[in-house]
Image (spheres, rainbow, N blue to C red):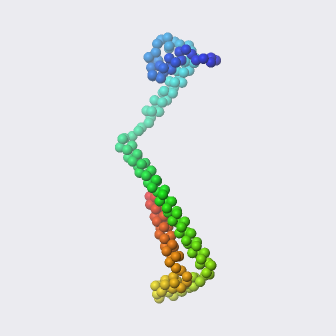
Amino acid sequence: MKLNGCAYEKEVTRVLLQGGWPAACTDELRAHVAACRGCADLVLVTASFQREREAAVSAVRIGTPGALWWRAQLRRRNAAVERIARPILGAHLFALFICAAVVIAALTDQARQGVAWLTGLEELPHALTLNLGGLWSSMLLDSGWSLVVLLPAIALLVLLGGVAAFLAWERQ
């Protein structure tokens, strides 16, 4: 095994990289490659890689310019939608957290006061048949329910409806 390369190795490499093997080289260089095992291996490996590269390049079908342009536009739009959706999702999660905190605080307050607000539910069947407006006013004013509880609950329902609509639209 030689540690130093062959004296003709650089010239063989130059001819191989220029794509002129074996037609563009001298008879002396061809005879040397036939006699030198290192140069013969270099020619064999380099020629094999060049053939495989040519086969791989010829196998690739790029497509029409219109289709490429359309795909690029679609990727750009999808990336823009993803960039826009991230802050919106964060705002939705923040609003959901705030509404959940308000609901938990309201339920904690109601639990401290007792279950007096459930008395309005006992009148539900009678009130539905007679006077729906009276039921709402009695449940909201008499049982301890107030706008502090009602407005965040409505906001939570609106938020959850918006999130559900967004998720349904995103899947389409």
Q: Quadrant of the C terminus?
A: bottom left
Total numbered circles: 0
Q: Quadrant of the N terminus?
A: top right
Task: Please determine whether, in this image, residue 37 is positioned above or below residue 95.
Answer: above
For the residue pair 136 and 27, the one nearer the viewer reads as: 136
For the residue pair 48 and 77, the one nearer the viewer reads as: 77
Q: Residue furthest top?
A: 28
For the residue pair 40 and 163, the one nearer the viewer reads as: 163
Tell me residue 89's x, y (percent). 49, 59
Task: Please determine whether, in this image, residue 59 is positioned above or below residue 39.
Answer: below
Q: Residue furthest right?
A: 1
Task: Please determine whether, in this image, residue 113 is positioned above or below residue 167.
Answer: below
Q: Residue at x 47, y 59 (%)?
A: 88
Tell me residue 15's x, y (percent). 47, 19
Note whether residue 128 is visible.
Answer: no
Tell me residue 31's x, y (percent). 52, 12
Q: Residue at x 56, y 72 (%)?
A: 103
Q: Quadrant of residue 144?
A: bottom right
Note whether residue 49 is visible.
Answer: yes
Residue 10 appears left or right of 70: right
Tell me residue 158's x, y (percent). 47, 69
Task: Please determine whether, in this image, residue 73 is positioned above or below residue 150.
Answer: above
Q: Residue at x 47, y 23 (%)?
A: 17
Q: Residue at x 51, y 27 (%)?
A: 49
